[in-house]
Amino acid sequence: MQNNGSPKNTLIANIEHIKNLNSATIYKIIEKNAPISRVTISKISQLAPASVTKITRQLLEKKLITETARQASTGGRCAISLAPNSSAFNMLCIKIGQKKLLLTCYDLAGHKNQQTQIDISQKSGDKLLQILLNSINVCIEHQQQHHKKISAISITLSGLIDPKNGHIIYTPNNKLDDLPLVKILEEKFQIPSFIGNHTRSLALAEYYFGASKNSEDSILISINNGVGSGIIIQGKLLLGKNYNIGEIGHIQVNPAGNKCHCGHFGCLETEVSDPIILNKVKQAILQGGLSSLNLKDLNIERVYQAAANNDPLCQKIVADATIYLGKIISILINMLNPEKVIISGKIIRADKTLFRILKQCIEHQTLPNFQRAVLIEPTQLQDNPTLPAFSLIKQAIYEGDLLQKIKAS
Ligand SMILES: [Zn+2]
């Protein structure tokens, strides 16, 4: 609803917002407890039975939920229960990576029904945008052939993203800077669309579906070509007014370190990232260091695996990098007192070398009460690169906005 700022319009906008939140609360309760009766929904939500009846009617009209008959435990009468109608909705979820464009169709329960992968290693800017729009079109047509339609589109990528206004501000890899992507998508396809930073959205995905599912406060640390984090506090993803919360990669950890692409020296990213660690192993082998690996088939997966298998050279290099990472994670634990810290990236293959050192750092650098409360674990979503985009859709449903816009197949 357009709000021109007058008191009356502000009041209408607020009432509309509360209605959306109530719908979202009821949808969430049904999703979590299905099959569930209206009476039980009213008890859990503490909303009046008349409101529950009205909202569930709207959700039924939108086909977001269905009625299921359930035999009552006493007597012969059937109580009508409600359940989500997840299979009636198709969500197109996309990850724009550095080399690959991944597109997956999910139903609302998170089941995949179509997946496509496109090589974009030589593509950026306008060319990449064209490939993106064409591939979305192909997915929409494919669904139409099966008499289905896409109810929402969601995209995650690296960089500085303004999810509220659907704007890409800056991308380190894809040259899609200053791009109103959501506006472009919604004008072209007439489908509600969302975008978000990949690491922040991954933190949300871990909270909804993965390692931090039952933790209200968690931190996700992602190590790939750089280092980033996503912070969830009281079940909410922290973004801040400028959407930058979690940019830990440019905290200085080694004043005598190398120059970073940001212009400063010794940033965390100059000591911990897949390319940096790979290069250090390469240099050490070239200088005659003893390792089970050889230069011919050297790659980062092998380096982390060798560290896990007690290769002394790889173990030492991964351990040195982990000490820097452990310092920053300890600062985050002291600041935010999380229940869980989740580590994502190929580095988790280094297994004990990584987690043993991180635990040592936390033991020596955080408050005793905080370290007793925190668990440090690997991601559970390593093989699911489009699930972070799906999480943005779930978030929009749980916050009520998408429930109003969504249309079933
Ligand atoms: Zn930097």
Image (cartoon, rainbow, N blue to C red):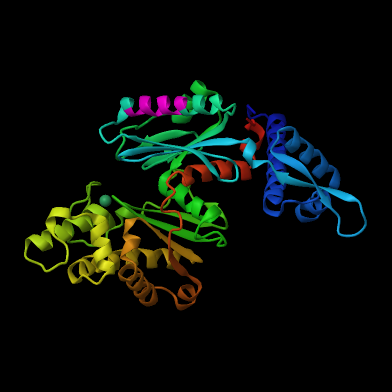
Left or right placement of residue 404 versus residue 371 in this view: right
Measured from the top left, where is residue 268 in percent x and y?
Answer: 28, 58
Quadrant of the image for the N terminus?
top right
Above/below status of 184 relative to 41: above
Above/below status of 211 relative to 316: above
Measured from the top left, where is residue 74 in percent x and y?
Answer: 90, 59
Q: 198 or 21, which is in the foreground?
A: 198
Reply yes or no: does residue 137 show up in magenta: yes
Camera sees residue 321: no
Residue drawn at x 60%, y 42% as measured from the top left: 108
Left or right placement of residue 211 versus residue 405 in this view: left
In this view, the residue farthest toward the left is 287
Q: Magenta span covers which residues?
A: 128-138
Measured from the top left, where is residue 67 in percent x and y?
Answer: 78, 42
Reply yes or no: does residue 302 show up in magenta: no
Q: Quadrant of residue 198?
A: top left
Left or right placement of residue 66 versus residue 80 in this view: left
Q: 316 or 226, which is in the foreground?
A: 316
Residue drawn at x 68%, y 41% as measured from the top left: 85
Q: 111 or 48, which is in the foreground?
A: 111
Quadrant of the image for the C terminus?
top right
Camera sees residue 112: yes
